[in-house]
Image (tube, coloured by chain):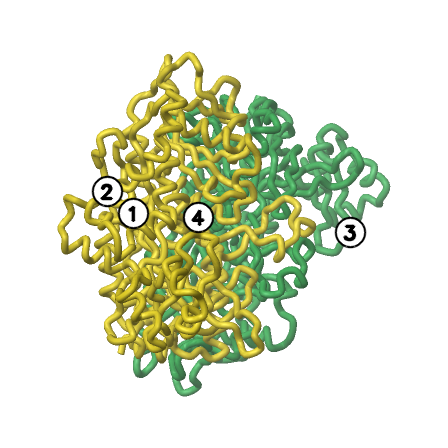
Chain colours: A yellow, B green
């Protein structure tokens, strides 16, 4: 039923239609900054020694169908997720207290800013046609693509309405008739989150007072720079807040914390400004430091530490980054053991907690007589599951029909080391066409992932929430299959949605 | 005096400042569509087979100083120029009447649209410090760069105000303090001109009535496509008018004039639209067909003829294109012979005609006892002049100090074949820095040319002017010199102005 929607979508394109769409999208992306810097495998340093060339971000030609019920539920749950994740901070923070106690320095900034993105897929249960919303991942650091995602929604919306009054850019299709992607406020929402932190920081803590700014800490050779610039442009134009970009490798060169000032303000000296120009950083926005390769040397850890101990509001703090980790999410999702979810969200409506829990793919241990053992050994139900080792690095995942035989092949007393997890079954018939950044146009079966953005500003000291908002979304669509030749069709594109 | 303004401009940049400005401009241009497709000499077809790559349009790092008096005069004269050029149509049209009479078909569309650009330089007379406005060229077809020019003004304005409240992107300089480029309304103004023609066309002349559109006729492999798209985006978004782009080579494939309809509507069938979709073209906007190389075969002439004989309003008509030719401008500028200027502008204030005439570089014949002969033979005054053959192809130009000797070397009875023209002396000390499209950053002495856009819609039958507007400007800055090695420093950049 739900799958049927995807069957005849997108509409077929004849060569002239396809050429028109591809040409229009190539031009539109460039005119509107829906761009990335090209990969070195596409354009070598030889060709482009000064790094001026740019190319379209990978985008789908059509918006993808998405169940309205799932979309609306994902939006509705975002502020609950925001809150859940900050509560979990308490839990993780125990791990850090020892370290902090030893340091005996303590925090000078208790406000914390989260720009989060919760990623979902629509799940078609084997026993029902009603799509369910299942969470894939929750991002607490460098939740990216808000800037470009808004542009893809604009691109598809414009195509749907082009030319004005007599839309013919897309071939006619029932799903596209009088249907538009929902408004995408990701840029406004994420920027407003950063601006709220900037305001909450209050007056300069330096004597004499310094002008204040937001600092984006970024990676070298960032290809996704235009995504980030969409936020800084909004902050400068709408919120009138100075924003600077600083490479993570240059944090220690251009920022200091004056040792004479117990408030520990983070001082930024723009290298391009006249001698002596200083800004006080209210908010540090990390678009780096989220992956081990971002820490190339001890100096990078020093840089992160300098940011962390400063009075600037961090987006995110170290603690908050940890609370988004997969391990924490596994604990929350567990259907057995203590109900962490309810205890963290003690003051939340139980009906909402139940909805939140429903977005987790169910997990089961293989205890004797339990539901997990039953689902794992029955070949029919095993088909919808994956068997994962309880601890990271504890072995390979076992999928679907291989599960019953695998379990029978190992001693029963080892079964407790494994956990059974329901697989997400996305709509099987989903298809789309994508324009890659190298200009290749590829089509085929796809899996789409919806991300919902949320921002939260809270006081880690008292737990008070100053602001908790949902706003904006991201649709990413990936090629599902390898082609008949076994070659990956290979695309991962920015997309938008038409709800049904 | 006037030159002094240019002496210490632009402010010096240290390496960090220069790097910041160049990096910021590279990113800003891409984020905001201030882009061109790269030249094949920069990025070969091998590297970019699908034509997705784009690069910044060449731009200056700083806005250029420009005398306020000249700028304001140029703006004030634009609607007079608009009108002058359409009056000249009458003059040229005599040449065409024979042809039209033979054809005995006549016009079905008497409305005509002009999107003009008048290009000027500030001229510093040898005997005065007061800069004068001198016209370099008047463009009546494909007056380009309105789209990108607005963006350069925005770029420089943003840099002047960045970051908000504490601008430090540019080093401090008196000319930049509390000074901003004037508002540049080129996109709004040119689009409004096209929209006015679309409206004036009135109802569809087809039975049954067809939806109406504006057609941009464009060149293959247009690198300056984003300049054009700025206008079509404005037409679609603000004026809600369908706009299509059509290659000049495909005019005959996708447009027709139904022979059964004496109104001769121009019908456009978008090749990408569903079978049978037709639009009636109200306005043909030529961004091609202005240079002989645009007419590769008889078929291109047929295409131009089909557009011309249709009911669509042409921007420009063949006549109007001719009226912008250099020969016509020479006749108007002539200081001897009949006063064509006053007769064409019979109902215009003589003071305004005088101002208009002042924008022409003075021209003199070498008649005996005349001023021309005196200026040409005196080595001091010859220095400010060029000697040009009266007819095109009549010989090479003779410059400055070479003039007296040259004249003495030829028989006096041949002097009448030459005309003496005052050279424009632009501010000698003008300098700027440019980021080229290939990423090279070059600096040096420059010559700047100011263009003022104007639009006019009139009825060629009765001479009635329906609309005559000035709006928007273009500053283009070219490297003046070759360097010590004799190699051209080579840049021609889009720029903006700060008035003084």
**What is the secondary structure assignment of the residue under circle 3?**
loop
**Tag 2 and tag 4, C-beta contact below 8 Å:** no
Image quadrant for the C terminus of chain A? bottom left
> Label 4 marks which chain's residue?
A
Q: Earlier in the sequence, mark 1 or mark 2?
A: 1
Mark 1, other Cα within 10 Å: few <14 / some 14–19 / many ≥20: many
Mark 2, other Cα within 10 Å: few <14 / some 14–19 / many ≥20: some
Give how far apart the Cα atoms at labels 1 and 3 are. Answer: 73 Å
Mark 3, other Cα within 10 Å: few <14 / some 14–19 / many ≥20: few
Q: Which mark is residue A468?
A: 2
> Label 1 marks which chain's residue?
A
Give x and y (percent) for residue B253. Answer: 52, 79
Give how far apart the Cα atoms at labels 4 and 3 are. Answer: 57 Å
> Label 2 marks which chain's residue?
A
Q: Both on one chain, marks 4 and 3? A: no
**What is the secondary structure assignment of the residue under circle 4?**
helix
Front in this rendered view, residue A352 or A36: A352
Residue at 43% across, 32% down: B162
Identify the residue position indicated by label 4 in the image: A227
């Amino acid at each position: 039923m739900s799958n049927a929607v995807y069957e005849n979508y997108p509409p077929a394109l004849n060569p002239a239609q396809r050429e028109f769409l591809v040409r229009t999208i190539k031009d539109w992306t460039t005119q509107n900054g829906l761009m990335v810097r090209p990969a070195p495998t596409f354009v070598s340093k030889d060709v482009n020694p000064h790094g001026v060339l740019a190319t379209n971000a990978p985008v789908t030609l059509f918006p993808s169908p998405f169940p309205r019920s799932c979309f609306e539920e994902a939006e509705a749950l975002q502020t609950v997720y925001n809150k859940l994740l900050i509560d979990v901070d308490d839990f993780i923070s125990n791990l850090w207290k020892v370290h902090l106690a030893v340091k005996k320095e303590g925090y000078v900034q208790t406000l914390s800013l989260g720009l989060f993105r919760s990623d979902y897929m629509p799940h078609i249960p084997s026993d029902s046609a009603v799509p369910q919303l299942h969470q894939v991942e929750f991002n607490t650091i460098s939740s990216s693509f808000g800037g470009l995602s808004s542009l893809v929604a604009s691109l598809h919306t414009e195509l749907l309405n082009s030319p004005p009054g007599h839309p013919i850019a897309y071939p006619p299709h029932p799903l596209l008739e009088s249907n538009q992607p929902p408004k995408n406020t990701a840029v406004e929402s994420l920027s407003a989150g950063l601006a709220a932190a900037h305001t909450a920081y209050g007056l300069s803590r330096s004597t004499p007072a310094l002008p204040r700014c937001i600092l984006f800490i970024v990676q070298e050779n960032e290809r996704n720079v235009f995504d980030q610039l969409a936020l800084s442009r909004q902050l400068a134009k709408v919120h009138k807040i100075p924003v600077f970009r600083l490479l993570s490798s240059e944090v220690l060169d251009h920022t200091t914390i004056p040792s004479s000032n117990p408030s520990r303000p983070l001082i930024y000296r723009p290298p391009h400004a006249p001698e002596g120009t200083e800004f006080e950083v209210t908010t540090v926005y990390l678009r780096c430091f989220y992956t081990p390769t971002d820490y190339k040397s001890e100096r990078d850890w020093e840089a992160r530490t300098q940011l962390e101990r400063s009075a600037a509001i961090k987006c995110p703090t170290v603690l908050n980054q940890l609370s988004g980790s997969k391990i924490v999410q596994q604990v929350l999702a567990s259907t057995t053991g203590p109900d962490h979810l309810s205890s963290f969200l003690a003051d939340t409506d139980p009906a909402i907690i139940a909805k939140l829990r429903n977005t987790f793919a169910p997990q089961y241990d293989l205890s004797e007589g339990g539901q997990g053992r039953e689902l794992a050994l029955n070949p029919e139900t095993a088909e919808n599951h994956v068997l994962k080792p309880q601890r990271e690095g504890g072995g390979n995942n076992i999928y679907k029909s291989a599960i019953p035989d695998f379990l029978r092949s190992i001693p029963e007393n080892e079964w407790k080391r494994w956990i059974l997890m329901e697989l997400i079954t996305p709509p099987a018939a989903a298809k789309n066409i994508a324009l890659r950044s190298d200009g290749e146009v590829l089509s085929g079966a796809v899996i789409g992932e919806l991300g919902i953005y949320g921002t939260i500003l809270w006081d880690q000291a008292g737990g008070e929430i100053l602001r908790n908002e949902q706003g904006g979304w991201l649709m990413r669509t990936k090629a599902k299959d390898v082609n008949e030749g076994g070659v990956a069709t290979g695309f991962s594109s920015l997309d938008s949605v038409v709800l049904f």
